[in-house]
C-alpha cells in the first residue's frame, strides 16, 4: 500500500511521468473501491470534480457548444451521446467516411450528429450475427449466432436458410438413430450407419444389425435384387416398390459414388419383341439421396450414365428416360441412402427421339395458341436466369411483327417440379439477354407492349418435369397507374392499400424478387426516419417489398424483404428526408396489401432489467427500437400462444409499458431476434394486465413474432417472452400511428 501511495505522489503534471489521463483513471479506480480512504491524498472526496481537460460548461465556451479536446481536435462527449461529433454550422461540415451513418448538423447543439443505421451494415447472412454501425468506427461484425446448449445429446447448428437454430439428437453415423445412451436413441454402434435399432437384421454377416442383442436371428433379411445375377425384371408399365435393406452399393455411378451410406438394387428393363419403345422410369422415396443409373451391359462400369434427384416436401425424386429401346433387357440401378423404400413407376410408350431444342441455336418455334410439351428429364442447363432454375432447360422462339402484349404459360404435367419461364431478347445466350422471368405452378409470364422483333423463351423446372408451354398474344393495353416508378402515386404512412396484380408486368427490377409482377408507390419523409414496409400476400405465393430511391434500380435499393408467408417485411433505419419508392411484388401476380410505417429516426434503446412489473421499461408514444436479453430474466408470465405443457410462467421474460393517449395502430416486429421469440400485448390499469385477444405471436418460424393491432387509449404491457422455453437476445421494433379519424 505504501508503494501504491508513493506511485500516486510521483505522478507530476510537469514530469516525465505526467500521463495525466492514466492518473485520472487510476485515482478514479481507488475512489470507487475499498481504498476510498486514500481520497485525502489525491482529492477523492467528490465524484463531481471536472476533468482539467474539459471546457467549463458554465462558461461562455460551454454555452456555445464547445466539446472535449482530444489531440487538439474538437470531439463529441462519447460518455453521454456517441452520435455527437465536432462543431458545425451546417450539414455540409458533417460528412464522415462511414456509409452506415446519417450525418447532419444539430443546430441546437452546434455539433455534428452521426446517426447509425445497423441495416446498412447488414451482409444478409444470419448465422454470422447482426452487424452494427458504430458512429465512430463504422460497420462492425456482431457476435455469431450461438446455438449451443448444455445438452451433450444434441448437435446444435445455425441454419442459414431458416434463420434459426437446429438442435438434432446426436447421431454420429447419420443413420437416423441416436446413440443408445441418449434419450430416444437405440444405436448400439454409432460408427456404423448400417447398424441401428431401426435397421433390419441381415442374414449371415455375423453382426447385430438391429441392436437387439442377438446376431443373425431367425427373422433376418436376405438382400433382394442386390446384383446383376438376380435382378427384378419389369416388362410392362406399372408401379412397384423396392427395399434397399441388406443390399450393398455394387454398381457405383457419378450420381451414387462410393464413400457414402448408399446401397443399390438392380432392375432389368425387359423390352418385349416388336417395335422399339421408350421407357420412362420415376423413382420416389423419403430417403435424402436417390438416383437411377444404367449401363450398356449390367456391371459395365465404363459405360454408365445416371440421373440424380431433387427433394420437395420431403419426397426425393429421380427420373431416367430411355429413348427408342430395341427389344432386349437393359440394366437399371436404383440407388439410395440407408435402408430406403423406393416407389418405382415404369411406363412403356411408342419410341420417340430426345428433344432437339436444347440451345438458342436449335430453338423450337412457339405458335400462339398452340401448346408444346417440354420434357425436361435429362436436359442440360444451358442458359442462366435470375429465377435460378434447378434442372436443364429447353428453348423456344417467336417473332412479333408489331408491338403486342405477350403472355407465356408453363403448366406442369406432373408433380416432379415447379416450372420457370425466361423471356429473352434476340441475343438469347447471355445473362443480360433475359428480359424477365417467372416461377410458379403454373408459371404465368406477362410482358406489356413487347416491341416487334424476335424473342426466345427458355423453360426449366425445379425437377425432372414435363411442362405444357403456351404463347398468347393480345393488342397493347395501357399500364396501370401504379406500374413503374416514374409517376408513382403517394402512399400515406400507416394506411394499408389493397393491390390486384393480375394485369401487372415485371416493370421494376430492384433485385429483390426476380420476374415478379410489381406495383410502385411514392413515400415521402420530412426528417430522418425509420421505415417499416409490410406486405401481406395470397396463399401459395411468394412476395417481396422493397424501398428505393426514385431511380428504382438495384443500386438504388435501400431495403428488401422476401418471403413465402405473410407478413413480408423490409426495414430501413435513419433514412434521410426525401422522396422514395416502395415496390410490392408477387411471384404469381396474386392480390397483396401494402403498408408503410414511419417514425423519427432514433438509435436502439437497451432494455436492461425490466424483469417484472416493478420496473417495466417505458415505450415512448412514438414507438422506437428496443433490444434486450431474456437469458438472465425470470419466468414471470405465461402467454396464450405458447406451446402446451410449459411450466408456470413459461420462458424467461421482460416487460415494457406503452401508454396511449389516442386510438392508434401499433405494429410490433421482433425480426432480427436470435431465438424463438414470443410476444404478448396485455391491457390494464396495472401491470401485467390481461392478454388481449389475437395479441399473442409466437416466433417459432424464421420471421419471428409480429403483431399489427388497433389499440384504444389506455395502458398496455408488452411481454417479450420465449416460445417453448427459449430465451436469448431479442430485438423489438415498434411503430405507433395515431388514428387520423
Image: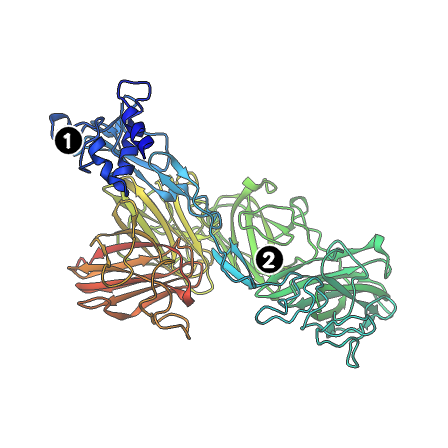
Relative height, residue 259 to residue 400 (above, below): below
Determine the secondary structure under disc 1. Answer: loop
Q: Which dot marks residue 57?
A: 1
Q: Earlier in the sequence, mark 2 or mark 1?
A: 1
Q: For this view, does 301 lie left or right of residue 91?
A: right
Q: Quadrant of residue 34?
A: top left
Specify whether residue 442 is in view. Answer: no
Q: Position of residue 404 (x, y in %)?
A: 48, 49
374 up-or-down from 4: above or below: below
Q: Quadrant of the N terminus?
A: top left
- Residue 439 visible somewhere in the drawing: yes
Q: Quadrant of the C terminus?
A: bottom left
Say whether residue 632 is left or right of residue 275: left
> Where does residue 78 sit, x and y in percent of width and height?
27, 35
Other-residue count near label 1 (Cα within 10 Å), few / some / many at <14 / 14–19 / ≥20: some
Relative side of 147 to 710, left or right? right
Amino acid at each position: 500500500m505504501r508503494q501504491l501511495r508513493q506511485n500516486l505522489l510521483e505522478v507530476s503534471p510537469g514530469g516525465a511521468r505526467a500521463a495525466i489521463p492514466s492518473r485520472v483513471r487510476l485515482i478514479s479506480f481507488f475512489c470507487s473501491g475499498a481504498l476510498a480512504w486514500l481520497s485525502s491524498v489525491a482529492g477523492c472526496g467528490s465524484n463531481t470534480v471536472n476533468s482539467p481537460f474539459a471546457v467549463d460548461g458554465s462558461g461562455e465556451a460551454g454555452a456555445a457548444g464547445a466539446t472535449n479536446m482530444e489531440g487538439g481536435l474538437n470531439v463529441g462527449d462519447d460518455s453521454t451521446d456517441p452520435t455527437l461529433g465536432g462543431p458545425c454550422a451546417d450539414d455540409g461540415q458533417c460528412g464522415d467516411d462511414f456509409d452506415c451513418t446519417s450525418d447532419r448538423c444539430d443546430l441546437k447543439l452546434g455539433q455534428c450528429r452521426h446517426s447509425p443505421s445497423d441495416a446498412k451494415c447488414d451482409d444478409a447472412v444470419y448465422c454470422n450475427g447482426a452487424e452494427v454501425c458504430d458512429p465512430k468506427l463504422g460497420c462492425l461484425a456482431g457476435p455469431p449466432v450461438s446455438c449451443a446448449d448444455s445438452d451433450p445429446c444434441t448437435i446444435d447448428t445455425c441454419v442459414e436458410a431458416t434463420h434459426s437454430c437446429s438442435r438434432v439428437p446426436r447421431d454420429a453415423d447419420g443413420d437416423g438413430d441416436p446413440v443408445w445412451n441418449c434419450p430416444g436413441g437405440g444405436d448400439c454402434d454409432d460408427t456404423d450407419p448400417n447398424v441401428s435399432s431401426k435397421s433390419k437384421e441381415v442374414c449371415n454377416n455375423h453382426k447385430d444389425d438391429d441392436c437387439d442383442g442377438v446376431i443373425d436371428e431367425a427373422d433376418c433379411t436376405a438382400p433382394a435384387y442386390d446384383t446383376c445375377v438376380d435382378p427384378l425384371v419389369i416388362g410392362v408399365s406399372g408401379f412397384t416398390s423396392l427395399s434397399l435393406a441388406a443390399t450393398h452399393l455394387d454398381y457405383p455411378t457419378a450420381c451414387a459414388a462410393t464413400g457414402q451410406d448408399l446401397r443399390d438394387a438392380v432392375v432389368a428393363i425387359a423390352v418385349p419383341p416388336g417395335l422399339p419403345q421408350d421407357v420412362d422410369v420415376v423413382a420416389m422415396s423419403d430417403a435424402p439421396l436417390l438416383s437411377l443409373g444404367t449401363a450398356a451391359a449390367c456391371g459395365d462400369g465404363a459405360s454408365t450414365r445416371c440421373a440424380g434427384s431433387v427433394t420437395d416436401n420431403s419426397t426425393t425424386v429421380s427420373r431416367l428416360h430411355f429413348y427408342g429401346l430395341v427389344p432386349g433387357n437393359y440394366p437399371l440401378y436404383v440407388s439410395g441412402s440407408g435402408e430406403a423404400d423406393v416407389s418405382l413407376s415404369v411406363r412403356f410408350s411408342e419410341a420417340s427421339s430426345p428433344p432437339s431444342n436444347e440451345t438458342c441455336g436449335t430453338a423450337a418455334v412457339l405458335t400462339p395458341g398452340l401448346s408444346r410439351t417440354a420434357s425436361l428429364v435429362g436436359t442440360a442447363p444451358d442458359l442462366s436466369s435470375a429465377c435460378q432454375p434447378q434442372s436443364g432447360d429447353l428453348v423456344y422462339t417467336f417473332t412479333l411483327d408489331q408491338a403486342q402484349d405477350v403472355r407465356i404459360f408453363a403448366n406442369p404435367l406432373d408433380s416432379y417440379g415447379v416450372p420457370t419461364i425466361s423471356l429473352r431478347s434476340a441475343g438469347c445466350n447471355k445473362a443480360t439477354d433475359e428480359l424477365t422471368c417467372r416461377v410458379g405452378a403454373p408459371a404465368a409470364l406477362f410482358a406489356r407492349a413487347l416491341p416487334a422483333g424476335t424473342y426466345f423463351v427458355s423453360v426449366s423446372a425445379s425437377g425432372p418435369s414435363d411442362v405444357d408451354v403456351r404463347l398468347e398474344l393480345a393488342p397493347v393495353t395501357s399500364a396501370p397507374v401504379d406500374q413503374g416508378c416514374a409517376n408513382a402515386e403517394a402512399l400515406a404512412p400507416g394506411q394499408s392499400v389493397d393491390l390486384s396484380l393480375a394485369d401487372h408486368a415485371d416493370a421494376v427490377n430492384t433485385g429483390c424478387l426476380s420476374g415478379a409482377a410489381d406495383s410502385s408507390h411514392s413515400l415521402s419523409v420530412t426528417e430522418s426516419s425509420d421505415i417499416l414496409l409490410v406486405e401481406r400476400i395470397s396463399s401459395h405465393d411468394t412476395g417481396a417489398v422493397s424501398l428505393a430511391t426514385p431511380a428504382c434500380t438495384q443500386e438504388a435499393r435501400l431495403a428488401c424483404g422476401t418471403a413465402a408467408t405473410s407478413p413480408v417485411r423490409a426495414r430501413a433505419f435513419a433514412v434521410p428526408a426525401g422522396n422514395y419508392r416502395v415496390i410490392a411484388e408477387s411471384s404469381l401476380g396474386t392480390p397483396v396489401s401494402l403498408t408503410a410505417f414511419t417514425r423519427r429516426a432514433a438509435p436502439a434503446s437497451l432494455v436492461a432489467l425490466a424483469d417484472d412489473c416493478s420496473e417495466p421499461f417505458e415505450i415512448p408514444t412514438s414507438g422506437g427500437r428496443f433490444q434486450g436479453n431474456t437469458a438472465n430474466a425470470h419466468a414471470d408470465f405465461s402467454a396464450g400462444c405458447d406451446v402446451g405443457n410449459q411450466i408456470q410462467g413459461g420462458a424467461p421474460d421482460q416487460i415494457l409499458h406503452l401508454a396511449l393517449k389516442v386510438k392508434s395502430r401499433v405494429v410490433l416486429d421482433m425480426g432480427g431476434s436470435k431465438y424463438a421469440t414470443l410476444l404478448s400485448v396485455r391491457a390494464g390499469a396495472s401491470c401485467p394486465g390481461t392478454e388481449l385477444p389475437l395479441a399473442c405471436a409466437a416466433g417459432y418460424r424464421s420471421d419471428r413474432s409480429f403483431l399489427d393491432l388497433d389499440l384504444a387509449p389506455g395502458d398496455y404491457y408488452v411481454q417479450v417472452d420465449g416460445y417453448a422455453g427459449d430465451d436469448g437476445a431479442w430485438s423489438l421494433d415498434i411503430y405507433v400511428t395515431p388514428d387520423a379519424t
